[in-house]
Amino acid sequence: GWTMEEFIDKEIERIRKLVGPTGQVIGAVSGGVDSSVAAKLMHEAIGDRFHAIMVDNGVLRLNEAEQVHKMLCEDLGVNLTVVDASELFLGKLKGVEDPETKRKIIGNTFIEVFEEKAAELERDIEKTGAKGGKIEWLLQGTLYPDVIESISFKGPSATIKTHHNVGGLLDNMKLKLIEPLRELFKDEVRALGRLLKIPTHLVMRHPFPGPGLAIRILGEITPEQVRIAQHADAIFIEEIRKAGIYDQMSQAFCALLPVKAVGVQGDRRTYEQVICVRAVKTEDFMTAEWFDFPPAVLRKLSNRITNEVNGINRVVMDITSKPPGTIEWL
Ligand code: XMP
């Protein structure tokens, strides 16, 4: 048995020994709980010799890159570089409708952008002439359930880990893996995050898939569709938070459907797209139940989305459990 305080001390000690006095570590952060906690722990252990990289793939939540930069870099002091690669990603996603193709494009492009940025960081470090200052380590926020799953599980959620597939990075860049959270469960990571002074709203965040809004926009991804999906999602989450029910559900999101419906606004007939809202409760994401929304919250968010999001004239709700549905639509 150990306390979380002891875990922090022990882990910081282990990281320092492993990396040595001049070693450098890189790692991707997503704005999610695991990568943020791992990054903060790393920063506590080796300061600016840990280099966090966040890739803006153009299908993140509204203002996500700015917010993560503010939180991790400005507030928590983590040495973070945000790479805006949205045009590259959106260019490659143009015309693509198939969900698995979307996932592959995003996964491969992520590795490409990350490697390029890492090489650039390495050149900068060399220029400063720090003795032995090579990037030799890659940080990963792998949790205990991920370890177990990757050993034993080949079920329908095998695709969950597509964007976490760092095999390419490890081989191509000859990096060694460092996984400080690999013995912890999610609730322990949250406790660790709180002890590391990470704000509660970050520590309690719902998971967000690596391919982001690309698997929540059905059909082709265009900048216009991204705008609609981001705006609707921001209103949905804002209303959930305002109602004080965010922590009661495991995940909540909007799917932008590839259909148009007739509506009426003022004295005008409209013919616009449909947003589907979905919120679920689950222990392990293998099965899930749809969340019972208070009707007043539904009424409010439906009004706001139809009034405020240009291009949407209808809001529907997904009341499908998993199984038979998956949590995401794609
Ligand atoms: P499904 O839709 O399979 O989702 O019921 C289960 C959980 O996995 C997330 N998910 C993904 N996460 N890359 C990710 O990082 C993916 O490609 C991916 N697909 C689904 C989903 O958001 C839910 O939490």
Image: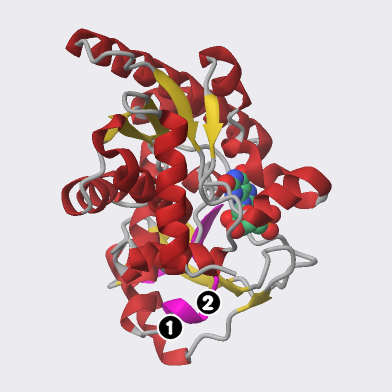
The N terminus is located in which quarter? bottom right
- Determine whether 2 is above or below 84 in the image: below
Q: Position of residue 258 (x, y in %)?
A: 56, 50
Disc 2, SS: loop
- Determine whether 328 is above or below 280 in the image: above
Q: Main secondary structure of the magenta part?
A: strand
Around disc 2, counting alpha carbons within 10 Å, would you say few (fewer than 14), some (14 to 19), or many (20 or more)? Answer: some
Magenta-drawn stretch contains 136: no
Residue drawn at the location 40% of the way across and 76% of the way down: 302
Disc 1, SS: loop
Specify whether tag 2 is near ligand 1 (CB below 8 Å).
no
Pick the front one: 79 or 60: 79
Which region is colored magenta? 246-264
Residue drawn at the location 63% of the way across and 25% of the way down: 167
Residue at mark 1: 245
Residue drawn at the location 43% of the way across and 77% of the way down: 246
Magenta-drawn stretch contains 262: yes
Residue at mark 2: 249
Pick the front one: 276 or 83: 83
